[in-house]
Image (spheres, helix red, strand yellow):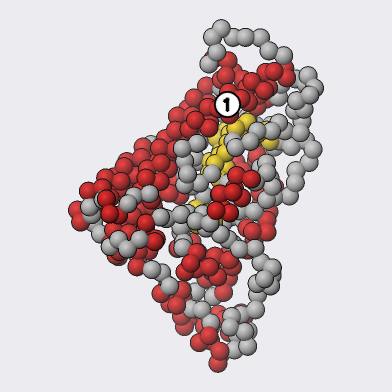
Amino acid sequence: MATRPASPRLPAALRPRLFTPASPATRTAAKAMPQFGSRRPQASASRRLADLAGRSVALSGDIPAIFDAPLAAHHKLIGRWAAKREKPEPTYTRVQARQHIERLFHTAVLEVLDPIELADFRAAVLLSEENGPPAIVILCQSLGQVDLGWIETSEAPIPWRAASYQTLEKTLRLVLPVFGYDELFEEFSMYYWDGETEDEAAREALIQYHGADAEALDELSMPSTMNAKRPGWMLADNAAPATELPPGLRKALHNLCHAHGALRTLKQEQSAWHFEWEQIQEYVPEMEECSRLPAMTLVPFDQFARELDDVGRHGMEMGFMDIAGICPLPDASRIDHWFASLHLGAQFLLAAQALIQLDPAKM
């Protein structure tokens, strides 16, 4: 009898594995990743996507740079925004205009995103599948566990680490495609225990739905054993109140919560960091084949390698939900609002980054 119920999966030696940002391969892989769509089925020659900002820039298949083709809707839209930034306005050929529009937008976006080390982002412009306006999408190019720094690896008091972890878990998902322990537990429970969360009911599910041997159940993972694997700093009950934290940590948490509050005041239709699933279906319908699981996680890989591999299997094969935000732009006036919200999101991520990079000895 196997140590767990049989399930459709690749042999362990052949399965792709999630990796943590602590490994040098993580950020190298993220930055070396080719254009949007690399983890999804390749689009046709007439793609709806034009990359206008990010670690690299490329024109879509229907806007060949070597031909004097008319400017498409996304270039016209961003071009109106770019024209306001130049005085006097020079004259360009269409080829020069496309290149200049992309260069200005690319530079403006990178000025905001470059200081962020927590994850790699890029921005791109999407053309609607349903004749809607162009939209700017923010993509997360990092994959795996968020590097938690001292929270995970230091010998700082557990209450300090737990308070920091809980704050990150409550706030980060506002801008980052990330999942926490509750989502991992729910996914794992649905896969192995038919959604059950108590040991006895999980045992019944293993026997009834997976054909597990009743005499071998002690060898199988149960809800209680999975919960017991959480280190103390992951538990909300261990978090210290703000009044019991050192001044440096208290200030870092305050800055993070303040930036989070500012971001929450944005109107959704003007936010660079918000999206609805229906919008993604309109602009990137091929994402229906991808996993709904976010590309990053706050769950430590060292303790939950098997569980993360299992729930992430579909994403490793077909692509994860790596969109951080998508903002349709009916007119060029919305672009300034988009940049304002992009900046607020970046400030929030920098506050999270500052928290993670704290030195416990200097708090």
Label 1 packing within 10 angstroms: few (<14), some (14-19), many (20+) = some
228 vs 70, left or right, is left
The image position of residue 154, as x and y in percent, is 35, 61
**Observer-nearest of 153 and 243:** 153
Amino acid type at mark 1: Phe
The local secondary structure at tag 1 comes to helix
Q: Percent x, y for residue 342? A: 47, 34
Residue at image coords 33%, 55%: 164
- The quarter in which the N terminus is drawn is bottom right
Left of 295 or right of it: where is 250? left
* Rendered location of residue 255, percent (x, y): 31, 42
What residue is shown at x 36% (from left), y 37% (from top)? 262
Image height check: is 258 above or below 134?
below
Number of numbered labels in the structure image: 1
The quadrant where residue 132 appears: top right
Evaluate whether residue 51 shows in this view.
Answer: yes
Residue 241 drawn at (x, y percent): 23, 56
Q: Quadrant of residue 236?
A: bottom left
Residue drawn at the location 76% of the way across and 33% of the way down: 61
Residue extending furthest left?
243
Foreground pick, 299 / 188: 299
Left/right of residue 18 with respect to residue 265 in the rendered view = right
x 61%, y 80%: residue: 5
Residue annotated with mark 1: 105
* Residue 170 seen by the camera: no
